[in-house]
C-alpha cells in the first residue's frame, strides 16, 4: 500500500549570509515598505564563519503558522514576518495562476513551521536580522517552489536583508517608485572577484545594548540635516566611486571610501537629536590604531567600518593579516592569549618589531576586544541538500 504522503510535511533547509555595508543605508522614505533614502553597497561575508540556517516545513496538518528562533518560539504576528510570508504566498499564487508548473499548488493553502538558528552567538552583537530575513525569504520561496527576484521581499523583512540575497559585492539600488518595485539588490561583482581581500570582525566587549537601527534611523531622518545632505549629495557619487574601486580591486580607494562612509554615518548619528552613540572607547581606539598603522606603513593597508554597534569590521589584504592581527593582539591584550582569540580562517604567526609598536605609540587597552572572527567575501543563500541538517523533524516540530 502506498503511504499517504500528503500528511508528511514538505521540508526545506537553507542558509544565508551576513553582509557588511561599505556605503551605509541609514534612513527610510517609507517605513512600511522599507524604502531607503539612499542606495547602499555591501560585502557578503563567508558562511563558513557567519550564517543563519532556516528550515521551513508545510503540511496540511499544521493548524497555524509558527516560528522558533534560536531555540525559542517567537511571535509570528510580527508585522515584518507577516510581510515576508504574505509577499511569498502572493508571488507563489501569481506564478501558479500564470501557469508556472514549479509552484507547489498543494502547499499554497498550508500553514508553515519555521525554525532558524545562527552559527554565531547573538551576544556577539553582530547584526543577525539581515541573514535571518534573507534566509527566511529564500527558504519560503523554495518550499513554495518560487524562483527569481526575491530581494524586494527580503527588503520588507529588514532593509539590509535584501543585500544578503546575493554573494560577493552587492548594491541596493534605492529606486524611486512609490510602490518600491524598483528598490532591489543587485550583485556588483561575485565573491570570486577579489580573492586576496580579507575581513576581520573585531568583537568588542560591551555592557549595554545600543539603540536599534530601526528606531535610530527614524530619529535621524526627523532631526539630522547632515543625513539629508549625505543622502542627496554625497552617497550618489560614492556609489559610483565604490563600484569602480571594487571593479578595479583598488584597495586604497576602497579602504579610504569605506572608512569615510563609516565616519559620515556615525557623524549623522551624532547630528541626530538627541544624539546616538554607537562607537565606544574601544571603537575609537581601533580607529586610531588603523590610522596610525597605515601611516607607519606609508600606505593604506587596513580599513575599518562600524554599523549600529561598537564592533569593528576590518578589511585588509591576505598578506597583511598576520601582522595586523598581532598588532590588535598587542594593543588589546586579550584575557586568554591562546588560539581562542582568533576564530575562523587560520592566521599565520607574525612577530612585531619594537619599531612598529613604538611607531603606533598607543597605550594598550586590556580586554577591549573579546575575539576576532577571520573571514572573507562569500556566496549568497543556498539550499542544504542533506536532510539530516533539517532543524525540524518529520513531525514538523523543532528537533
Ligand atoms: C547601520 O537593515 O537593520 O547596518 O531596515 O529598519 O531593519 P531596518 O534596518 P537595518 O539597518 C542597517 C543599518 C546599518 C547600515 C547598513 O547595513 O547598510
Image (spheres, helix red, strand yellow):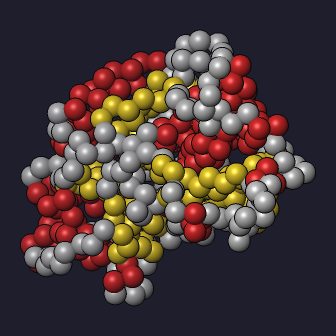
Seen from this angle, which residue lies furthest right?
Answer: 63
Q: Residue 36: x, y in percent?
A: 57, 26
Say above or below: 11 vs 159: below
| Residue at image location 73% in from the left, 64% down from the top | 394
Q: Residue 8: x, y in percent?
A: 76, 56
| Residue at image location 35% in from the left, 75% down from the top | 342
Q: Ligand 1 falls in which quarter?
A: top right
- Between 263 and 10, the one lying in front of the other is 10
Q: Is residue 211 left or right of residue 184?
A: right
Q: Residue 294: x, y in percent?
A: 18, 54
Q: Is residue 331 left or right of residue 186?
A: left
| Residue at image location 23% in from the left, 28% down from the top | 244
Q: Residue 331: x, y in percent?
A: 30, 73
Which quadrant holds residue 222? top right
Task: Report the number of discs.
Answer: 0
Which quadrant holds residue 220? top right
Q: Can residue 260 be seen here?
A: no
Which quadrant would the C terminus be assigned to in this image? bottom right
- Between 63 and 128, the one lying in front of the other is 63
Which quadrant holds residue 111? top right
Q: Is residue 108 left or right of residue 244?
A: right
Seen from this angle, which residue lies furthest top?
Answer: 177
| Residue at image location 55% in from the left, 32% down from the top | 147
- Between 358 and 168, the one lying in front of the other is 168
- Between 140 and 4, the one lying in front of the other is 4
Q: Can residue 100 be seen here?
A: yes
Say above or below: 277 vs 339: above
Amino acid at each position: 500500500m502506498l503511504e499517504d504522503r500528503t500528511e508528511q510535511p514538505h521540508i526545506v533547509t537553507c542558509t544565508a549570509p551576513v553582509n557588511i555595508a561599505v556605503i551605509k543605508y541609514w534612513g527610510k522614505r517609507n517605513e512600511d515598505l522599507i524604502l531607503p533614502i539612499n542606495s547602499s553597497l555591501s560585502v557578503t561575508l563567508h558562511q563558513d564563519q557567519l550564517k543563519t540556517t532556516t528550515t521551513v516545513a508545510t503540511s496540511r496538518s499544521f493548524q497555524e503558522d509558527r516560528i522558533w528562533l534560536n531555540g525559542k518560539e517567537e511571535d509570528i504576528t510580527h508585522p515584518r514576518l507577516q510581510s515576508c510570508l504574505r509577499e511569498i504566498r502572493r508571488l507563489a499564487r501569481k506564478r501558479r495562476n500564470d501557469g508556472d508548473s514549479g509552484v507547489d499548488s498543494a502547499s499554497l493553502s498550508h500553514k508553515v513551521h519555521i525554525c532558524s538558528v545562527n552559527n554565531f552567538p547573538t551576544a556577539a552583537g553582530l547584526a543577525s536580522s539581515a541573514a535571518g530575513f534573507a534566509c527566511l525569504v529564500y527558504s519560503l520561496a523554495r518550499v513554495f517552489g518560487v524562483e527569481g527576484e526575491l530581494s524586494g521581499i527580503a527588503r520588507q523583512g529588514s532593509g539590509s536583508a535584501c543585500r544578503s540575497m546575493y554573494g560577493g559585492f552587492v548594491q541596493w539600488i534605492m529606486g524611486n517608485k512609490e510602490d518600491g518595485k524598483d528598490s532591489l539588490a543587485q550583485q556588483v561583482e561575485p565573491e570570486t572577484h577579489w580573492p586576496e581581500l580579507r575581513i576581520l570582525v573585531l568583537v568588542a566587549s560591551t555592557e549595554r545594548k545600543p539603540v536599534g537601527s530601526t528606531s535610530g534611523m527614524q530619529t535621524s531622518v526627523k532631526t539630522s540635516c547632515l543625513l539629508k545632505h549625505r543622502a542627496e549629495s554625497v552617497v550618489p557619487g560614492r556609489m559610483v566611486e565604490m563600484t569602480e574601486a571594487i571593479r578595479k580591486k583598488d584597495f586604497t580607494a576602497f579602504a579610504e571610501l569605506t572608512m569615510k562612509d563609516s565616519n559620515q554615518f556615525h557623524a549623522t548619528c551624532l547630528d541626530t537629536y538627541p544624539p546616538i552613540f554607537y562607537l565606544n572607547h574601544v571603537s575609537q581606539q581601533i580607529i586610531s590604531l588603523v590610522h596610525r598603522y597605515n601611516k607607519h606603513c606609508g600606505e593604506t593597508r587596513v580599513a575599518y567600518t562600524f554599523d549600529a554597534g561598537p564592533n569593528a569590521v576590518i578589511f585588509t589584504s591576505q598578506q597583511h593579516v598576520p601582522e595586523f592581527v598581532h598588532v590588535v593582539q598587542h594593543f588589546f591584550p586579550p584575557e586568554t592569549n591562546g588560539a581562542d582569540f582568533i576564530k575562523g580562517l587560520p592566521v599565520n604567526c607574525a612577530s612585531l618589531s619594537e619599531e612598529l609598536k613604538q611607531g603606533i605609540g598607543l597605550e594598550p587597552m586590556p580586554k577591549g576586544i573579546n575575539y576576532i572572527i577571520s573571514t572573507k567575501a562569500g556566496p549568497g543563500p543556498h539550499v542544504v541538500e542533506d536532510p539530516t541538517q533539517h532543524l525540524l523533524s518529520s513531525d514538523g516540530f523543532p528537533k
